[in-house]
Image (cartoon, rainbow, N blue to C red):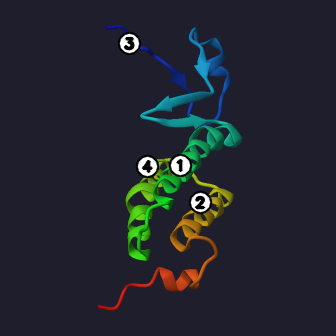
Amino acid sequence: MRRKLIFFILGKRNSEFETFPHEFKTSVKILGVHFDYKNVRRKKANFDSVLKSIKKVLNMWKWRGLTLIGRIQIVKSFAIPKILSKASLIPVSSEFIKEVNKELYSFIWKGKDKVKRSTLILKMAV
């Protein structure tokens, strides 16, 4: 089995690395997460696919006659883990969070919000 060796510089580049005989990558994928020096490319590689995947999952469940609690459970089980797996490793932009929130709340309420979002995240009284 042949191993693949990739060099990726963490931190600032300096002149020492110019004489190194191997090529350095500016982007690398480790366990499904893309690491890149450019924020735009990193966001596109990681979070555009996540948003697309979340939309696909929510569309698949949208036509079923789920209750409010059922729709919330779908979001908690299938959508949020997709985000957290990458967001725990790399920074997430506020624009992405707004887009995801729009999709999630739209799915939960089947359109426009019917209750304030701050009320929705409160604990249920038993």
Q: Nearer the viewer, residue 22 or 56?
A: 56
Nearer-N-terminus badge (3/1) = 3
Q: Nearer the viewer, residue 34 or 97?
A: 97
Which of the labelled discs sits on residue 26, or is there none?
A: none
Position of 28 relative to 72 (above/below): above
Q: Which of the two discs, 2 and 4, sits closer to the camera?
A: 2
The residue under label 4 is 85
How busy is the neighbourhood of tag 4: few (under 14 within 10 Å), some, or many (20 plus)? Answer: few
The residue under label 2 is 100
The residue under label 3 is 3
Nearer-N-terminus badge (3/2) = 3
Indicate left or right for 13 with 67 as reference.
right
Q: Secondary structure at mark 2?
A: helix
- Residue shown at the point (46%, 52%) measured from the top left: 88
How busy is the neighbourhood of tag 2: few (under 14 within 10 Å), some, or many (20 plus)? Answer: some
Which of the labelled discs sits on residue 56, or is there none?
A: 1
Q: Position of residue 71 (x, y in %)?
A: 44, 68
